[in-house]
Image: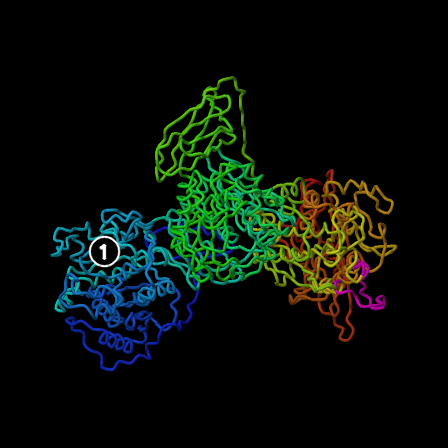
Amino acid sequence: MVANWEHVSMTLKLRVSLFAFLFLFVVSLGDDRLLGSRSARASTEEAVETYDIYYNYNELTKRLQSLAQKYPHIANLSTVGQSVEGRQLWVMRITRDPDRKSLGKPKFKYVGNMHGDETVSRQVLVYLVEYLLTKYGEEERITELVNSTDIYIMPSMNPDGFEKSTEGDCSGGHGGRNNAKNKDLNRSFPDQFDKTTVDPANIPEVMAVMSWIQEKKFVLSGNLHGGTVVASYPFDDSASHEQEGHYSPSADDGLFRHLALVYSQNHPVMKTGKPHCPDTPEETFKDGITNGAAWYDVPGGMQDYNYIHGNCLEITMELSCCKYPFASELQREWDLNKESLLAYIEQVHIGVRGYVKDAVSGAAPSNVSIVVAGVRHNLTTGEYGDYYRLLLPGTYNITAVPQEFRHHNYADMELFLRKYSSEFPSITHLYSIGQSVEKRELYVMVISDNPDTHEHGEPEFKYVANMHGNEVVGRELMLNLIEYLCRNYGTDPEVTELVNNTRIHIMPSMNPDGYEVAEEGDTNGYKGRNNTNNFDLNRNFPDQFANITEPRQPETKAVMKWLKSIPFVLSANLHGGSLVVNYPFDDDKDGNSYYSKSPDDEVFQRVSRAYSQENPLMHQGHPCEDLYPNDYFKDGITNGAQWYSVPGGMQDWNYINTNCFEVTIELSCVKYPLAKDLPKYWDQNRRSLLQFIHQVHTGVKGTVSDMWDGTGIPNATISVEKINHKITTAKTGDYWRLLVPGTYAITASAHGYKPVTIYATVSKDRVEVVDFRLTSVRSEGNRHSSSGPRPTQNPSEKEFQNLIKELSVGQGLDELVKNTATESNFRYRPSKEMSAFLRGLTLNFPHITYLHSLGQSVEYRTIWALEISNKPGESEPSKPNIRFVAGIHGNAPVGTELLLEFAAFLCINYGKNPAITKLINETRIFIVPSVNPDGREQAVEKQCKSTQGLTNAHGKDLDTDFFGNASQRLVDPQPETRAMMNFIQSHRFTLSVALDGGALVATYPYDKPVQTVDNEGTLKYLATVYASNHPKMHLGNTECSNNGQSNIPDGVMRAAERQSHLGSMKDFNMDFGHCPEITVYTGCCLFPPAEQLATLWTENKKSLLSMLVEIHKGVRGIVRDKSGKPIVGAIVILNGGVRLFTVEGGYFHALLAPGTHNIEAVAEGYQQQSVHNAKSRVHILFLPTAATMTALVVTACIIWCVCAAKSNRQKDGFHRLRQHRDDYDDEVRLTSMGSKKSLLAHEFQDESESDEETLYANKI
């Protein structure tokens, strides 16, 4: 990755953590969104500034228009909106080329006259505009500032109020402070602590400025007021809303103090900290600055909104004791503030700046989070990937975190989960609790610092989403949350604390079957709500009041078993259709809609409010006025039964039957919103999701242990006086009990022990630790527990040639298999789900995958080929192409599932495992999982010998349909055959591996009955490599019938010996694709039970990887003429038989078995050839012949000595051959017919130390 930074007085330590992003500087683009100043016309000539008059609205407008007209090269006047009375909110933009978008310049703004009767700022900002424009090109400081900064100045945010104000009114007693609707604009912005809102119709000024802030992504801002002389910084209020004296620091408190000091220390009066205002003569401010809330509480202020909801850091400057002084004071006020105003603008250039760009596509993503470790406040990138992060001098760890929003179908979700499990193995653990009706896994992702096991003393928390399949917002939020927690762990203190101290379980979908039939855009429908058996899962749990007669569904059973196996403390069940947190009980004994209070009603209300109060819409209590105008939920929460009765609900079952307190959260009015709306749901719920997790750390926790030996007592009972709800301890004696603040008598009891009662006081902000030591009334056995660390191993980086050697000898491949284990849950995927799986790979791994559509089957199912490479979709003739293909017989689908898993395995390990990464970087891998999707749809699981599905929809065995010679073909090829034939001939494959079933053997060409096979040794050798890496196949004892053969030497045989036939794909590859293909039969049963797939994957994984290694052996080279021009179409002949053709760039690649081989090269129109560089590649150089009409064809033989290492298993490879001299030419040129002799006259010496030292190089 490339990083370019500008920084001021600081050392920046950068760590970029994202899929494939890097920081760059890029060029600027035009901006046509502001109003052009050239269209503005002043009705009078520009007046000379006298600094002794106030401009009313009309005069201000004319003055600004005049300045914009006079300085069009650096000034642009625009409006961001209108006031209540229709006055424009003018903004002067000052920068070089103001009509264009200023890429690379930080955006700065000043806003004045927010309170209409505080007028000094209005005039001072006009003076600042004039000063910047007139001094540009004259003063170096001003010129540099304007050239490097995108400055926006709004002299008046409240022009209506100004018109009502009275000059000389110092205290504001004559009106004008508020807007024309009598609203204080600096109390009308959304507030993080005070959730009251103002009708947008009454505050058009605020709404316009909010939109402006969101659009421009300002970096730094000043809000200019009057009434005293001080610089005030965030936060302006606090959660307690104490009127004064409560210091409310932001995450950037030190930085805000610095910015405030820059202004105050350049102001002669402000820096003294003693403004001596007549109304408050004793009021002082140390150094002329103050925290806003410490001064007095201001909910709904603009500066806090800038910081929390924009990228902008803003402070408030109070410029004068008198709010509306006489105009004669204006010159003095300008002189006092001029230097402060300029120095403050210059602060926009401190810290770090840069761009985020996609490393592959070059796209500049917006809204990528910029995270500074240790600072709990993130910024986001702008429209062109630009960002500016103000920071004080120091060393920082900065991370760019992209957020992805889209709907994930099951296959896509599965890949997402596996990807994050693989990418963050130290904090994630992916598991399944069971399967749905349609055998989809019910996945759960654990995120914790020790994710695999329960840690003593650490609470277990869970989120469950998508219980109703068509209520999808929770499903996507859970994937967003997984990404957010993983990518912010270690950098964001809040996330790090939660992950380190909580074991968080996230189930994105409890009803994956229902989701697959639900439809995007469904507002309040029912399609997909229930499971495949058409049962509502949230009416399917045992109920304390009602008798649930419907059969228990597999999803319900799996969840019930899961909840009994883990000591969950707190949970939320995420739904859609409203905006409210619903808490137990969900029904009552009468089945009526009345408040049904649980024993822990206060606790449930508290945790419910913790969620709703962080959601800007939910807490208002009017969730979906367009859909349900009569719904109202105070504080955004409700008792379940009071809303409506839900017998058989999951939340009540949690509370009654386990230790877990669960609520149900309705996240959206629309059940299945459009994908474009997903970002807003994340913005609304991110803080709520985190805050709810925090609630698991309230109440009391501790350990119940044996007094004598200290061992934990499992299943001990924890009871709280006056609360009729008991919980039990976990396996090691630890417990957690949620409680609201107060003093409680808590009792621990266990069978065979004397109970103990302890009084404990629970505080508001932390969990109270209460341990119990119980005395046994009889002897108890010893308890022991042990655990040990699991070793991890990370292969070191090595050169690619050495990597191939390492993977070919000893335990190289075994170690690779061992170190790349991934969480897998196998099942058979029908065609539709297979397509979704493949598309999911391209969505999750776009930089290394490309999905090719080869054609369609008879029944119009797509035949896919997935390309995996570091440059997918690009032609790279220097790389070997390998094809893995399966499913030519639909009744043998094991190969299809193995290749899908192989594809996911490669993608997930790319960038994480060095060996896999290098193999993908150096290879073009094509995976065709199903040639015959129609047949696959007809096949039946657990049918080991059935021919149902063997043929395509026309009843044709596709492996008898590949005839390249027109004279052999009586009818047109099947559409599946045609698709594969075109694919084979359009790509110069080096090797093809086909997977089939019904035997346990590897076969090599040909299928047709022939007496001799050119290069048979190499073909057999390739099949042997696969078989030798298979734990059973190489033994040769298949234990199933193979044309009467039960013992096959080395598990390898010529295909025709097994079952000879014409028209096979293997033979077509050989004859017309010039590519060897081996067919691997993975097992005796054609369609074994899905439970066997995991074993079959384990058996074949190493063999599949061995093919990726094998593809980099043999002979690879380039054919050129004397001038160095590559020769395309030259024929390379192996051992006088097998022919290859050079492709673009003159490249060729031939796989060879260990031994001695002749390689001949023929090119029409050239005289002689043969150049040998034994260290890297074969270069065959041709010189033109003198013949003009008929070319003289000459061949040159290169003798290759290929030696096999001595081992208990056959190993292949080439000894390194070097010329016997220190300096050797890269090419040996042959210039005469007798040059063959001179070529061979060079002495080559094997420099290996022994016969067993073998080089496994990719390019020889």
- The percent coordinates of residue 1022 (x first, y second) are 75, 50
The reply to whether residue 111 is in sight is yes
Residue at the limit of the structure toward the front, as seen here: 590
- Decide: is 749 above or below 964: above
Would residue 535 be found to the left or right of residue 1096 on screen?
left
Amino acid beneath label 1:
Ala
Identify which residue, 1172 or 1099, lies in the foreground: 1099
Would residue 611 be found to the left or right of residue 438 on screen?
left
The reply to whether residue 402 is in sight is no
Q: Residue at x 35, y 76 (%)?
A: 36
- Residue receiving disc 1: 231
Q: Secondary structure at mark 1?
A: strand
Q: How is the image coloured?
A: rainbow
Residue 1220 magenta: no
Segment colored magenta:
955-976
Residue 973 magenta: yes
User: Dot 1: within a 10 Å radius of its alpha carbon, few (fewer than 14), some, or many (20 or more) residues?
Assistant: many
- The percent coordinates of residue 89 (x first, y second) are 29, 70
Identify which residue, 448 or 645, lies in the foreground: 645
Would residue 1220 be found to the left or right of residue 328 on screen?
right
- The percent coordinates of residue 539 (x first, y second) are 56, 47
- The percent coordinates of residue 154 (x first, y second) are 28, 67
**Chief SS of the magenta region:** loop
Identify which residue, 652 or 299, lies in the foreground: 652
Identify which residue, 641 or 1163, lies in the foreground: 641
Count of number-bearing discs: 1
- Decide: is 372 above or below 859: above
